[in-house]
Image: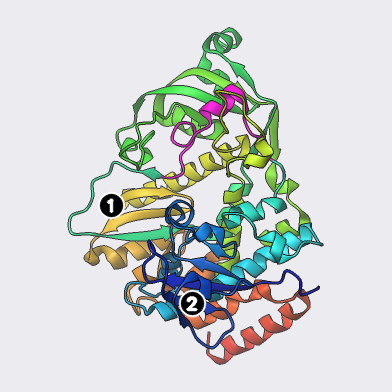
């Protein structure tokens, strides 16, 4: 491949993320981080992941004009998330070290992503591959086309009205507690989300009268439908043991008062079993299909590669893929809207995936609640709970027992050894990854993380050498 368009990847942490001037910068592969005095000190031949929020990046500073810079949420994790998941307390770590650690993973994530993009578009360069405001937007090109609601249907397809990005519960906060995060193994969770039955259009509107004409029982009509339904409903009553956790219609923003009135078919089927539901109307599609089967062969191979399960960076890319399926339609593709029209907040397929995420994480949250823990919020593959320090070890053990991996900084030092008896409640494919993370085998994980970036012809020898190394260490 020509060098034209080839990029390096780096991280810059400004001293003041609201007034980006001086700070620390590091390009993956260089010897050490260096001080800068302004954004103009940064090479234009490098893609820089900054710590500036999207609000300041696009609206309160001029950083967005520098095409080589990216805001803090460009990835599905922030710099602080990366540090905590690799057992560094970001509040206690030197910014120069944060730059070096996060740049390593940023580079690997981008290289894995570029390989997927190039498999689908062989002639593309890095210059043209990474042009979106987020990596999710950049990876859209490797996904099958999805269908977006139009006109009246688009007006109902909004966050907190037809789907939940994440759910703040109404459970009580534990006094004198701290937050702890646990999550599903990313790559396997991406497969779970992408295997969600995908609704296919066209969609037609059915009023309350239309549904009643088709069936004496509107709930039964939706429950038995083999066609995908986006259902308008009113929730009359819910099991009191479940309601505080399911938290139907709760919002995180105290300034928003949006009523949840629509749910995708998969969420309706669960709600109909745990609550009294009044069906008012529905948008009904043609049939169900499969997004997973429509993915390019190279993307499916990436997701099913048994060695990628051990790679943290591959997991980030996998999460990026399924979340990219849920994006709002790009303005260019949506075209010019008529007066009163609006873009939908996600596609029909995206709404079903968001419903699957809500249900999966609700189920895992209920597992923790039944064990006596207070879950404060959940969604996008993770759960946040409030625990006291005295509860920490039990919480870590219990989370692992139901298939949830704790953030590495939340695991007490020395709690696990690589040879310990280990109770894992998730898919057995991810058991070793969970064990390595719980035992905080960072060096081992760093080597395993490299595997997806290695050329295919060199991957087997590299893995064989790692196996020998681990055997020598008695692992």
Q: Residues within 10 Å of mark 2 (few under 14, many from 20)?
A: many
Select label 1 or label 2 by which is in front: 2
* Relative to 341, 360 lies left or right: left
Q: Which mark is residue 25?
A: 2
Label located before the other in sequence (1 or 2):
2
Asked if disc 1 and disc 2 are in contact, CB closer than 8 Å, the reply is: no
User: Is 162 contained in the magenta span?
Assistant: yes
- Who is closer to the viewer here, 155 or 227? 155
Residue drawn at point x = 51 percent, y = 20 percent: 219
- Give the percent coordinates (x, y) of residue 353: 57, 42
User: Is 159 contained in the magenta span?
Assistant: yes
- Give the percent coordinates (x, y) of residue 59: 45, 51
Q: Which quarter of the figure has residue 390?
A: bottom left
Residue drawn at point x = 56 percent, y = 37 percent: 351
* Relative to 445, 182 lies left or right: left
- Give the percent coordinates (x, y) of residue 72: 47, 61
What is the count of numbered marks? 2
Q: Which residue is mark 1?
A: 372
Alpha carbon separation for disc pair 1 and 2: 44 Å
Residue drawn at point x = 52 percent, y = 39 percent: 355
Q: Is residue 439 visible?
A: no
In magenta, the rendered stretch is 146-166
- Who is closer to the viewer here, 268 or 128? 128
Q: Residues within 10 Å of mark 1 (few under 14, many from 20)?
A: few
Q: Is residue 469 visible?
A: yes
Q: Quadrant of the N terminus?
A: bottom right
């Amino acid at each position: 491949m020509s060098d034209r368009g080839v990029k390096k990847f780096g991280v810059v942490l400004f001293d003041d993320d609201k007034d980006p001037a001086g700070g620390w910068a590091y390009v993956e592969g260089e010897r050490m981080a260096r001080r800068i005095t302004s954004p103009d000190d940064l090479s234009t031949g490098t893609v820089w992941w900054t710590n500036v929020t999207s609000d300041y990046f696009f609206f309160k500073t001029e950083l967005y004009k520098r095409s080589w810079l990216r805001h803090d949420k460009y990835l599905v994790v922030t710099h602080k998330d990366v540090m905590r998941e690799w057992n560094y307390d970001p509040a206690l770590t030197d910014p120069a070290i944060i730059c070096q650690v996060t740049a390593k993973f940023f580079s690997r994530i981008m290289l894995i992503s570029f390989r997927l993009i190039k498999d689908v578009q062989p002639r593309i360069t890095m210059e043209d591959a990474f042009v979106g405001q987020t990596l999710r937007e950049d990876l859209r090109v490797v996904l099958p086309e999805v269908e977006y609601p139009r006109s009246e249907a688009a007006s109902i397809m909004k966050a907190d009205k037809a789907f939940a990005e994440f759910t703040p519960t109404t459970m009580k906060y534990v006094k004198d507690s701290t937050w702890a995060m646990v999550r599903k193994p990313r790559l396997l969770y991406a497969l779970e989300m992408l295997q969600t039955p995908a609704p296919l259009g066209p969609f037609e509107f059915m009023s309350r009268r239309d549904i009643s004409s088709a069936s004496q029982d509107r709930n039964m009509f939706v429950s038995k439908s083999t066609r995908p339904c986006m259902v308008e409903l009113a929730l009359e009553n819910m099991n009191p043991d479940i309601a505080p956790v399911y938290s139907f219609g709760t919002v995180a923003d105290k300034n928003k008062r949006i009523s949840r009135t629509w749910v995708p078919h998969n969420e309706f089927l669960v709600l109909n079993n745990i609550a009294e539901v009044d069906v008012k109307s529905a948008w009904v599609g043609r049939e169900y299909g499969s997004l997973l089967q429509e993915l390019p062969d190279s993307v499916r191979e990436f997701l099913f590669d048994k060695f990628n399960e051990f790679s943290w960076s591959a997991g980030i890319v996998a999460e990026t893929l399924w979340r990219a399926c849920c994006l709002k339609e790009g303005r260019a593709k949506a075209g010019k809207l008529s007066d009163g029209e609006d873009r939908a907040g996600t596609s029909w397929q995206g709404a079903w995936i968001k419903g699957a995420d809500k249900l999966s994480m609700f189920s895992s949250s209920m597992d923790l609640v039944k064990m006596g823990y207070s879950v404060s919020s959940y969604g996008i593959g993770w759960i946040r709970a409030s625990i006291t320090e005295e509860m920490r070890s039990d919480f870590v053990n219990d989370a692992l027992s139901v298939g949830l991996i704790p953030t590495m900084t939340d695991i007490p030092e020395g709690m696990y050894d690589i040879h310990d008896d280990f109770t894992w409640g998730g898919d057995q494919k991810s058991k070793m990854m969970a064990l390595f993370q719980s035992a905080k085998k960072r060096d081992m994980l760093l080597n395993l993380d490299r595997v997806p970036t290695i050329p295919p012809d060199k991957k087997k020898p590299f893995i064989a050498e790692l196996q020998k190394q681990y055997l020598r260490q008695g692992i």
